[in-house]
Every structure is written in structure tokens, then in C-alpha cells.
Amino acid sequence: MVGLPSYIKDIALQRIDILLENALNNARKNMELAQRQAHIAKKICMKFNIRLPYEKRQLFCKGCKKFIVPGINSLVRLGNRPKSIRIRCLECGHIYRKIVER
Ligand SMILES: [Zn+2]
């Protein structure tokens, strides 16, 4: 999107933050609601062409695009050599690996 006032993007970002925070809080009790909130957050991202920071992007599975929460519907494992984080989505089995070199 071209020529979008930056304050609109700020508002969109704030909404995304709130939605994802609520989704995280709700995930344990009500995953369906959490999925819906995360889905709305993702739609706002796409609409305003917003790229989420890494720690928020990892809440979405690269395979099935679902909202995944460590300990609930995803598993996070730390690996050695190279130091890495492996996030496994329990919804579709997709494994996302990130190398954390220092
Ligand atoms: Zn998945």
C-alpha cells in the first residue's frame, strides 16, 4: 500500500499487539478464540503490509499458518551445534528451525 499515513500503521500495530496478547492469554483456556484473534491480527498485518517482529512471527506455523503456542500446540526444543531453536507445530507437524549463532 502506498501513501498510507504512518499513524494508521501505528494504530494497526497496536491492535495487532493487543490481539496477539489476548490470543496468548486465551490459548490455554479457549484455543478456538485464540485462533480467531490471531487470525484477525494476521489479516490486519496483510491489509497494512506489516511485517511482524520475529518473536511474533514464530507464533504462526509456517506450514498450516495456525497460531501456535509453545507448550500448548507447539513444542520448542533447543539444539546444539549449531545452536538452534526447533519449533514443532503439533497441528500439522511442521518443524521450523532457527539457527541462533552468537
Ligand atoms: Zn502447522
Image (cartoon, rainbow, N blue to C red):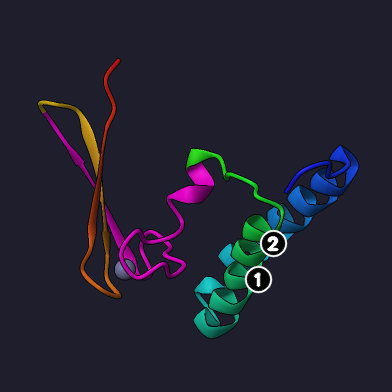
Question: How far across and how far down the image is residue 13, in percent?
Answer: 74, 49
From the top left corner, tell me how far across and down residue 5 is, in percent.
Answer: 88, 41
Residue 71 or 3: which is nearer the viewer? 3
Q: Is residue 22 visible?
A: yes
Label of residue 40 in the image: 1
Q: Residue furthest left?
A: 81
Q: Is residue 71 left or right of residue 6?
A: left
Taking the image in four quarters, ligand 1 sits in the one at bottom left
Residue at numbered disc 2:
44
Please identify the quarter of the rendering in which residue 47 is found.
bottom right
Quadrant of res 72: bottom left
Q: Residue at x 87, y 48 (%)?
A: 8
Q: Which residue is depicted at the point 60% across and 82% down?
A: 33
Residue extending farthest to the top is 102
Residue ranking furthest to the front: 2
Mark 1 and mark 2 in contact (Cβ < 8 Å)? yes
The quarter of the rendered structure image containing the C terminus is top left
**Looking at numbered disc 2 in the image, what kind of residue is underneath it?**
Ile
Q: Is residue 65 left or right of residue 24?
A: left
Q: Amino acid at mark 1?
A: Ile
Where does residue 78 sit, x and y in percent of width and height? 22, 40
Query: Label 2: how many residues lie within 10 Å, few (<14), some (14-19) or many (20+)?
Result: some
Q: From this viewpoint, is residue 25 visible?
A: no
Is ligand 1 less than 8 Å from the beta carbon at label 1?
A: no
Please tell me whether the stretch drawn in magenta is mainly helix, strand or loop. Answer: loop
Residue shown at 70% from the left, 53% from the top:
17
Pointer 1: residues within 10 angstroms few (<14), some, or many (20+)? Answer: some
In the image, which disc is placed on residue 20? none
User: Residue 11 location in percent, x, y?
Assistant: 85, 50
Instruction: Give the SS element for disc 1.
Output: helix
- In magenta, the rendered stretch is 55-80
